[in-house]
Image (spheres, rainbow, N blue to C red):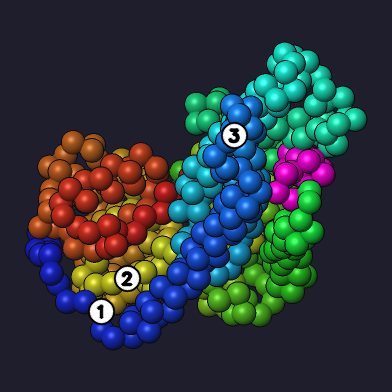
Amino acid sequence: MTEAGYALGSPRLAAPARPRERRRLATSALIWAFVAGNAAVMVWLWVHGGNLSDDLSTGALLTGLARITGLLGAYSALLQVLLLARLPAVERLFGFDRLTVWHRWNGHACLDLVLAHVVLSVWGYALMDRISLPKEVSTMLGGGVYPGMITATVGTALLIAVVVTSVVIVRRRLRYEWWYAVHLLAYAGIALAWFHQIPTGNELVLDRVAADYWRALYLGTIGLLVAFRILGPTLNALRYRLRVAEVIPEGPGIVSLRITGHRLDRLDARPGQFFLWRFLDRKRWWAAHPFSVSEKPDGRSLRITVKALGDFSSRLAEIAPGTRVAAEGPFGVFTEEARRRSKVVLIAGGIGITPIRALMEDMSGDVVVIYRVVRDEDVIFRDELEELAAERGITLHFVIGDHATEDGARLLSPTHLQEVYVCGPPAMTELLGRNVRRANVPPRFIHTEKFAL
Ligand SMILES: Cc1cc2nc3c(=O)[nH]c(=O)nc-3n(C[C@H](O)[C@H](O)[C@H](O)COP(=O)(O)OP(=O)(O)OC[C@H]3O[C@@H](n4cnc5c(N)ncnc54)[C@H](O)[C@@H]3O)c2cc1C
């Protein structure tokens, strides 16, 4: 591999990025203000509900803490839904990858708050009612004094099931489809918890405005969810009428699918983005999988290229031309728009070449593509890549062989790296991300696509 000679401090891209950047900052500030503003309203309701007075007994103090953890727990459950509701503005701003990571952390925070709410409520009310903990639990579940508690308990159990199945180690032992199915129970958990909130929530039960505010939060969340996860994809399926046109073998265990449809230019899909694809035949209609477009969309068709890694991907070669397709998207910020500098390094690991192959059609200037594979026969699109590189003046390197080769080591030398796009398996993108940061490349110049959510 030739030395590309990248030094930090190469020229910034010219002005057009600035208004876009300002718009992004403004949208981001609005979203954060909305999220923090609602949290502040909840804290205000709690303070206003008399939970901070000087002469609180231990029982009152504990129930006060139970209330704030309950309010914030329910709020984080709604945020949890919104994080993956495919809201276009949020998606465009932060990217699916980052939203998934936030969804994971927020899910843990949500469960911690809900569990704290349960424990503090039982403990606090037991002290105030001067009865034992088991007696307090049976009073609460009895239904006479506190309505909606049985459904809330079932809801909490469902949320626990979801978080437990999401813990990475458990997730690895379960099939993805099982993990996903259990995940859907979170919606049921949140809905069931709703029934005890207004009837028993101290801050909501007496104040009509507060109760209406709470209803509006839930209705707003449901509305966005239905609009962007159900109606949007359904309308798109009818509008674009996608079908598999061709199945093309690309290499051992790798196929490309060409998908045609009606007026695909209106999708506004850009190189580097991905869709969640659902193939509507008898075997596959119920599962949606993420795959990036592997060439620049031309308004008439989309191409994806898939490596056989598991039960779904390894049977995609059998798909019949003519099969109808529903696609959610486009998603992702691994695009030319994310670029801040004129000098760029794009690093693909294995099948991670798909979005990078497409990005090469969109990028010009000082661009270096490094394509890392283990064996020579793993290289796909060799002719296309060489042709594109020659056409667009892109420097292309194939790094084939073991990770410990001399080329592999030099690949990450600090002088080599300026602005970096990395796409590949999670272990590789994480390692590269860490090493690139160590090479003093500021995080805003590193763009990754992990191929795992
Ligand atoms: C943003 C993104 C873009 C991707 N682009 C491509 C591409 O262009 N070409 C390509 O070959 N692969 C791509 N992948 C990876 C591809 O989605 C998985 O390899 C595929 O879904 C595996 O499914 P499986 O049932 O065959 O394998 P499994 O053995 O069931 O799964 C293997 C791993 O893939 C992930 N996975 C499985 N199903 C899903 C799903 N429905 N949604 C999210 N993750 C899932 C899980 O982490 C799982 O552990 C991409 C992944 C992401 C997140």
Residue 201 magenta: yes
Q: Classify mark 3 as within 8 Å of ligand 1 or not, answering yes or no.
A: no
The quarter of the image holding the N terminus is: bottom left
Q: In this view, does 56 lie above or below 390?
A: above
- Report the predominant secondary structure element of the magenta stretch: helix
Residue placed under numbered mark 1 in the picture = 13
Residue 122 magenta: no
Q: Where is residue 296 in the image (x, y as percent from the top left)?
A: 47, 72
Q: Residues within 10 Å of mark 2 (few under 14, many from 20)?
A: many
Magenta region: 188-204
Q: What residue type is labelled 1?
A: Leu
The residue lying at 22 percent from left, 59 percent from top is 442
Q: Residue furthest right?
A: 144
Q: Is residue 204 above or below residue 146?
A: below
Depth order, front residue of 144/194 = 144
Q: Where is residue 203 in the image (x, y as percent from the top left)?
A: 70, 49
The residue lying at 16 percent from left, 39 percent from top is 405
The residue tagged with tag 3: helix, strand or loop? Answer: loop
Q: What residue type is labelled 2?
A: Arg
Looking at the image, is mark 3 or mark 1 earlier in the sequence?
1
Q: Are marks 1 and 2 in contact (CB under 8 Å)?
A: yes
Q: Tell me how far mark 2 sits from mark 3, CA to CA.
A: 56 Å
Q: Residue furthest front?
A: 55
Q: Tell me how far mark 1 sits from mark 2, CA to CA.
A: 8 Å
Residue placed under numbered mark 3 in the picture = 56
The residue tagged with tag 2: helix, strand or loop? Answer: loop
In the drawing, does residue 115 fall left or right of residue 398? right
Q: How many discs mark residues in the rendered view?
A: 3
